Image (cartoon, rainbow, N blue to C red):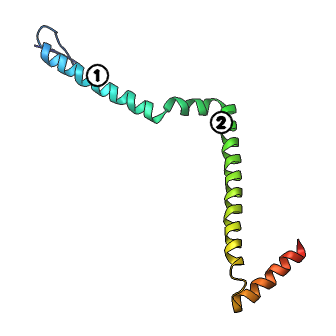
Amino acid sequence: MGKLTGKTRDYEVNDHPFELRHEVKRLNTRLDQIAESLEKSEIKDILENYTDPKKRIMTNLMAGISRGVGLSLGTFIVLGILGYIVSLFINVPVIGEYLAEIKKYIDANS
């Protein structure tokens, strides 16, 4: 049987082969789960990002440029579609007169 030394037990392989194999399999399974979790969390990439300032600066610069270009293009497309829809209402009696005045003002200033 195992001897109690402090808070740990020393097992002899010949005394308890089944329990030891079972415990080793359980620990190996748990270690595999931990390794898989670390791979999924991409801890290596996170550590590289914080230890390499040049990489962090380039990443943030590219992210900022991408956001700026995307926001500009998105605004351009939405305003273009909105302008087209508004131009369809120029022949409507009350709204059309107001929109026609806005169009004349825009044409005069551009």
The residue depicted at 33 percent of the width and 30 percent of the height is: 33
Decide: is 59 above or below 67: above
Expressed as whole percent of the image width and height from the top left, the position of residue 47 reads 55, 31
Q: Residues within 10 Å of mark 2 (few under 14, many from 20)?
A: few
Q: Is residue 70 left or right of residue 8?
A: right
Q: Which quadrant of the figure contains the C terminus?
A: bottom right
Residue 7, visible in the rendered structure: no
Relative depth, front residue between 106 and 62: 106
Decide: is 94 above or below 54: below
Relative depth, front residue between 68 and 10: 68
Q: Secondary structure at mark 2?
A: helix
Q: Which quadrant of the figure contains the N terminus?
A: top left
Residue 13, visible in the rendered structure: yes
Relative depth, front residue between 100 and 17: 100
CB of mark 1 within 8 Å of CB of mark 2?
no
Expressed as whole percent of the image width and height from the top left, the position of residue 22 reads 18, 21
Q: Earlier in the sequence, mark 1 or mark 2?
A: 1
Expressed as whole percent of the image width and height from the top left, the position of residue 27 reads 27, 23
Gap in Å between the C-alphas at discs 1 and 2? 36 Å
Name the residue carrying label 1.
Answer: 28
| Among the 4 quarters of the image, the one containing residue 49 | top right
Tag 2: residue type?
Arg
Tag 1: residue type?
Asn
Name the residue carrying label 2.
Answer: 56
The residue depicted at 76 percent of the width and 89 percent of the height is: 97
The residue depicted at 73 percent of the width and 83 percent of the height is: 90
Q: Secondary structure at mark 1?
A: helix
| Among the 4 quarters of the image, the one containing residue 53 | top right
